[in-house]
Structure formats: structure tokens, C-alpha cells
Amino acid sequence: MDIIQIKTQEQLEDAFQVRKAVFVQEQGVDEEVELDEHDGIADHVIVYDEKKPVGTGRVRNVDGIAKLERICVLASHRKHSLGKAIMNKLEEIAMEKGLNKAKLHGQVQAVPFYEKLGYKTDSDVFFEENIPHVKMIKDLGH
């Protein structure tokens, strides 16, 4: 499997395909909300399994902090450490841009996953698209 930083429109469309499968079809998020104005300014990564897109995520600079977003893996490819690989690549991109702190809005059921990667819960539960989330933060160090 290959994880790469997205450089082409075709790769970005592949990422959108994965996000639609996970967030829109599987979790019921409205497609107009899922694909947003931040897609044009964020750095995206994608995971390919024999040229088939199977995972993605994005990172953007929000007030000097790396905000990791839209991290997802197709159901068929979960439990293969792809989520961890995506997170590592997004953090690497953030550090290359001089960002030493990261935050994310993690779905509550994913909190243990993010905690294993060093993230700490920094809020009470709140809802985004009717899905319970918490804000999580991590010092990326340098």
C-alpha cells in the first residue's frame, strides 16, 4: 500500500470518493457538508491499495495549529494500521510547515485510536452532523 501527499486533481477526486463512501454513505453526513471550502487550501493524503483509493485525510493551518480532518479508511481496509499511517503522514506535513501543535475533532468511538497516537481530549462531547465528537490536541514537538 502506498500513502502519498495529493498533487493532482485526479488524486483529490480519489480522496473525495473515499470520503463519500465513509462519511456520506456509511455515516449519513450530507455531501454538501462533507466536501467544503477548506478542500482547496488543505494538504491532502491518500492511501492506494493496488491503485484503488482506500484511505485519506487532510491537514490545514488554523491559527498556527495543524488541524487534522476528514481522516477515514474504507471499511474493507480497516484494522490494517492505515489510519495510523495517515495520521503520521499528516503530522509530518504539519511539521514540515513549521506547525508544532495539532488538533482534531475526533468521533467519540475513535478516541482510543487517537489516544494511542498521543492525542489528549480537550473538550466535552459536542455534535457535528449529529455525530458525537471531542476536540483532541497533541504537541508535535520539533
Image (tube, helix red, strand yellow):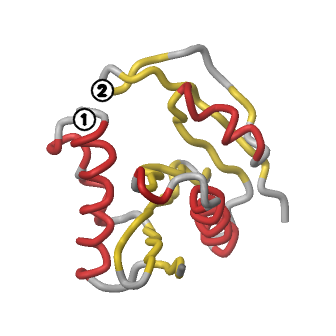
Q: Position of residue 115 (x, y in %)?
A: 74, 38
Residue 129: numbered disc:
2
Question: In this orientation, which residue lies closer to the viewer: 53 or 135?
Answer: 53
Which kind of residue does numbered mark 2 sit on? Answer: Glu
Tag 1 residue: 29
Which kind of residue does numbered mark 1 sit on? Answer: Val
Q: Secondary structure at mark 1?
A: loop
**Left or right, residue 64 beside residue 17:** right
For marks 2 and 1, the one nearer the N-term is: 1
**Left or right, residue 10 beside residue 66:** left
Q: Position of residue 128 (x, y in %)?
A: 37, 26
Residue drawn at x 67%, y 61% as measured from the top left: 99
Circle 1 packing at 10 Å, graded few (<14), some (14-19), many (20+), is some
Are the residues tagged 2 and 1 within 8 Å (C-beta)? Answer: yes
Q: Secondary structure at mark 2?
A: loop
Circle 2 packing at 10 Å, graded few (<14), some (14-19), many (20+), is few
Q: Position of residue 12 (x, y in %)?
A: 29, 73
Q: Classify 5 as above or below 83.
A: below
Question: In this orientation, which residue lies closer to the viewer: 112 or 70?
Answer: 112
Residue drawn at x 54%, y 48% as measured from the top left: 63
Residue 106: numbered disc:
none
Q: Quadrant of residue 32?
A: top left
Cα separation, mark 2 vs mark 1, equals 6 Å
